[in-house]
Image (tube, rainbow, N blue to C red):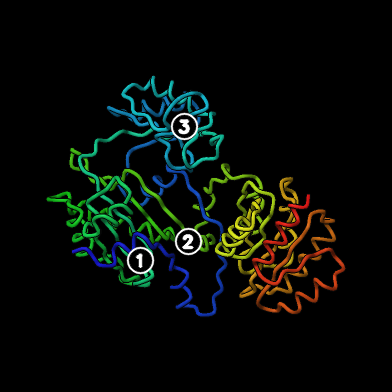
Amino acid sequence: MASPMASQVIRDLPLLRATLLRRRNPGIQLTPRRWLNLQEYQSKKLMADHGVTVQKFFVADTANDAIEAAKRLQATEIVLKAQILAGGRGKGVFSSGLKGGVHLTKDPKEVGQLAKQMIGYNLTTKQTPKGGVKVKKVMVAEALNISRETYFAILMDRACNGPVLVGSPQGGVDIEEVAAKTPELIFKEEIDIFEGVKDAQAVRLAENLGFKGPLQQQAADQIKKLYSLFLQIDATQVEVNPFGETPEGQVVCFDAKINFDDNAEFRQKSIFAMDDKSENEPIENEAAHYDLKYIGLDGNIACFVNGAGLAMATCDIISLNGGKPANFLDLGGGVKEAQVYQAFKLLTADPKVEAILVNIFGGIVNCAIIANGITKACRELELKVPLVVRLEGTNVHEAQRILNESGLPITSASDLEDAAKKAVACVTKK
């Protein structure tokens, strides 16, 4: 039967590996890192390297390479897929005029013609910036018929303090929709992190996914291999949709999304070396270099915060008070003075920024360190735009003393709404 908590698992995908580590090492301090982005072909190679069955494929960065790849596949039908990090590629449009970032063909020569209209051109989808993203590579893979589609994932579940296997016989669609409309079709197996996936669990889930006869054991073996992959690469999520079967009687992982524990970078150097940052804005890469998280927006008030939740709240309250956030820059937890300086350097380099709002809650962060970093940045960068600062929490009184005695034109705020009103007023006066 489907677990009563299965729907919640789909809706709530917390990452608990850090919690497990802290239980074994209570003194450990982990600093979250930026998310690792891999292209589809990279994820499929990881799966293939760990014995998971995927379509045969090659990667090409020229039309001639694509033709050669199609010939080497010796497949009846070939699928050509543009490699960008955004979703919705199948319905995207290229700047060359070609419609669709995914194409099927039985003619290797047509592969070359399609590749010429893909490589070097921008592909625009619902998930890309307005101008699209330049396609530098295409994946040339054998096209397999799918006789039946199911869904399979390995997730971290807060309720059971560890990983769970989640599956549904309804694959190839949005699993959130399945969980909402037919939760009885979501099946869950909780995994003991020390014992791993038991044979009985893998077979039971394969049966619940509707695999029959020899396919059932084949699916169970694939489930166990995917769990082995999950552990070995320090993943926080492995989602396969569809996890399908072919008319020839083969269980294949047709598409997959892998999320990684970025705190395990020191163990997974070869994987993190594949991180594709080419689609990021240069300022995002520069921010990541200093362990800062930056997201550009369209307004004129820069948001300098610590924590994603606080960042979103700051952006919202600026908007509610009639302003427009230009970006948000997240310092994270283990912040140092040098990071504060670099953060200001990044923010002031943006010509759209007409005011900066600093909103820091000092839980882990020491507000005095922030204050020292702010005053240093203001002096050395000769800050030309208005600066509104709201600090609260650890060592806040010392921080306020540092700011008040700095002699710099810094506007203090008593709370977040006061800070937003003052920041909006600064840009409204201009």
Percent x, y of residue 391: 69, 71
Q: Are marks 2 and 1 in contact (CB under 8 Å)?
A: no
Measured as percent of width and height from the top left, residue 4 is found at 25, 67
Q: Residue at x 51, y 40 (%)?
A: 128
User: Mark 2 = which residue?
Assistant: 261
Q: Earlier in the sequence, mark 3 or mark 1?
A: 3
Q: Is residue 307 above or below residue 221?
A: below
Q: Residues within 10 Å of mark 3 (few under 14, many from 20)?
A: many
Q: Which residue is mark 1?
A: 163
Going 32% across and 43% down the picture, which residue do you hit? 254
| Tag 3: amino acid | Ala
Nearest the camera: 91 or 287? 91
Whether residue 333 sits left or right of residue 339 in the image: it is left
Q: Are marks 3 and 1 in contact (CB under 8 Å)?
A: no
User: Against 190, is 102 above or below?
Assistant: above
Please state which of the two labelled residues, at mark 3 or mark 2, is closer to the viewer: 2
Q: From the viewer's side, name the closer residue of 298 and 371.
A: 298
Quadrant of the image containing the N terminus: bottom left
Disc 3 target residue: 60
Relative to the observer, which residue lies in front, 210 or 394?
394
Compute the Cα span from label 3 to label 2.
Answer: 29 Å
Alpha-carbon distance for marks 2 and 1?
A: 13 Å
Q: Identify which residue is drawn at 31% across, 67% down.
A: 196
Earlier-in-chain disc, 2 versus 1: 1
